Amino acid sequence: MMNNSPGAGPAIRIEGLHVVRGGRAVLPGLSLQVPRGQVVGLLGPSGCGKTTLMRAIVGVQKVAGGTVEVLGLPAGSRPLRHRIGYVTQAPSVYADLSVRENLAYFARIVGVRGAAVDAEVGRVLDAVALADHAGHRVGRLSGGQLSRVSLAAALVGTPELLVLDEPTVGLDPVLRRDLWAIFRRLATAGATLLVSSHVMDEAVRCDRLLLMRAGRMLADDTLAGVLEATGAPDPEQAFLTLVDRAEAAAAAGTATAQEVSA
Amino acid sequence: MNPRLTLATAGRVLAQVRHDRRTVGLLLVVPCVLLGLLAWIYDNTPLFDRIGAPLLGMFPFLVMFLVTSIATLRERQSGTLERLLALPLAKADLVAGYALAFGALATVQAVVAATFSVYVLGLDVAGSAGLLVVIAVVDCLLGTALGLFLSAFAATEFQAVQFLPAFVLPQFLLCGLLVPRDQLPDVLRWVSDVLPLSYAVDAMHTVTVRADGTGDVLGDLGIILGFVVVLVGAGAATLRRRTA
């Protein structure tokens, strides 16, 4: 490491994260790193623990063990609440307020004051291309507009790390492309983005991939690296190959264990 | 806690209510209609003067209890609570913001209902009519605080609505409106002594029948505000940043 400034080191460092939900180990010991200034895709099937992992990073998940360090600080510590933007899977904004009222409220919560609130709301509205809808009631927007409002609400105050839980799922191709363009612009401006999806096609949009299944990491690499390691032609095939390998390894492990005990 | 964030939250809650004109209308009109109905039922009897004022305190309490329960439950279910708890907002700011917003609404409601009762329905108040409004506002705050606290234990709207008969009706039965509290069986009287609504009704009763009861009323109000503070604190304590 060149220096000890807080800008150095990975954006997220997780070691041995252990999370139990409803008596089941959802994350039975997970380790990973997310470098700064990149768009990192967290890909895996529904129910594999992506949301739980993201909640642990944001600091709203009860964890049973392990280390989660975000921007050099323990996850969930108070100074981080100004520096992380979190978009939950369901659009979490107030349906009975206008777009502008929603964003102004969240801007005030992250510490924007007075006349700067309007400027900040204008900035994030432009970022998600919703300036035309500023006065509209959120509950009357379309699904795509709604998820962009939810994203905009996470962009107020220019957080250094954005944790986005399935922001593009269920949206049409044009909207998905637009959102990924926004993510790219944010990363170019210096933010780190962790974006989850269960659509493997989205891997091509990411700088790095975290492939996850049943609470475990199958791969933590670039797309090129994953394709090379698996010899697969596309991300979906690569994922399936990794799943097969993991299952074969697990079966071999079980067989060995049985031989030992026999 | 940060007063700016508390005020921002109160402003946001009021903006939500403001967009819902029908709710505002219901909040202001329903207590007046009910009190009017009561005055009509007890026309030509002294009964309206006896129970009109306690009910003036009770209706806003009920309405605020329901509105607050549903509002906070919605915040939990919509995911906005999870977002807020990941942001630099103290839990006390959120709860106090709600209490402030609904307290402001309650004040308007109490002023309208009390004015209507005294000047239109001819409710006879021996003490000060201003004090009547103050008691009604404090009762509203009590409803808000109880709703904030209990909503933490409701997983669905159905449960939240059931909390009304479960936690509010017993207070209504024991508050002294049906049978004066000193005529209740001992055990029930002890129970009524620890229920906040009893003090609300005592205060309303005092202000209507005694011109010199301000001291007693303030004592009752102090007790109710104590309940409010404890319930709001407990409500904030039930919010957890980290959940399973």
Image (cartoon, coloured by chain):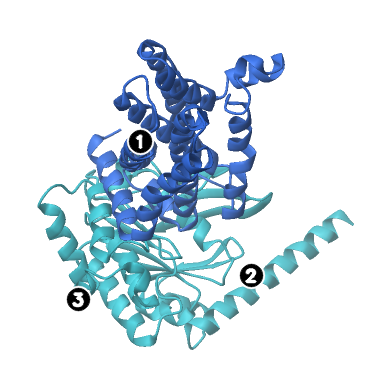
**What's the CA distance linking mark 2 and mark 1?**
72 Å
- Binning the other alpha carbons within 10 Å of mark 1 as few (below 14), some (14 to 19) or many (20 upward) gives many
B167 or A142: nearer the viewer: B167
Q: Residue drawn 50% across and 77% down?
A: A229
Q: Residue drawn 57% across and 27% down?
A: B177
In the rendered image of this protein, does residue A132 appear above or below residue B121? below
Residue A248 screen position, x and y as percent: 69, 72
Q: Which mark is residue A132?
A: 3
Q: Badge 2 is on which residue?
A: A246
Indicate the amino acid at tag 3: Asp
Label 2 secondary element: helix
Task: Report if the CB atoms under discs 2 and 1 are less than 8 Å apart.
Answer: no
Farthest residue, direction bottom: A233
Read off the chain for label 1.
B
Label 3 secondary element: helix
Q: Which mark is residue B114?
A: 1
The chain shown in cyan is which? A
In this picture, residue A230 sits left or right of residue A260: left
Give the label, 3 or 2, closer to the camera: 3
Indicate the amino acid at tag 2: Ala
B211 or A230: nearer the viewer: B211
Read off the chain for label 2.
A
In the rendered image of this protein, does residue A52 appear above or below residue B205? below
A46 or A121: nearer the viewer: A121
Task: Report if the CB atoms under discs 3 and 2 are less than 8 Å apart.
Answer: no
Q: Residue drawn 38% across and 37% down?
A: B117
B103 or A71: nearer the viewer: B103
First along the sequence among labels 3 and 2: 3
- Binning the other alpha carbons within 10 Å of mark 3 as few (below 14), some (14 to 19) or many (20 upward) gives few
Q: Quadrant of residue A126?
A: bottom left
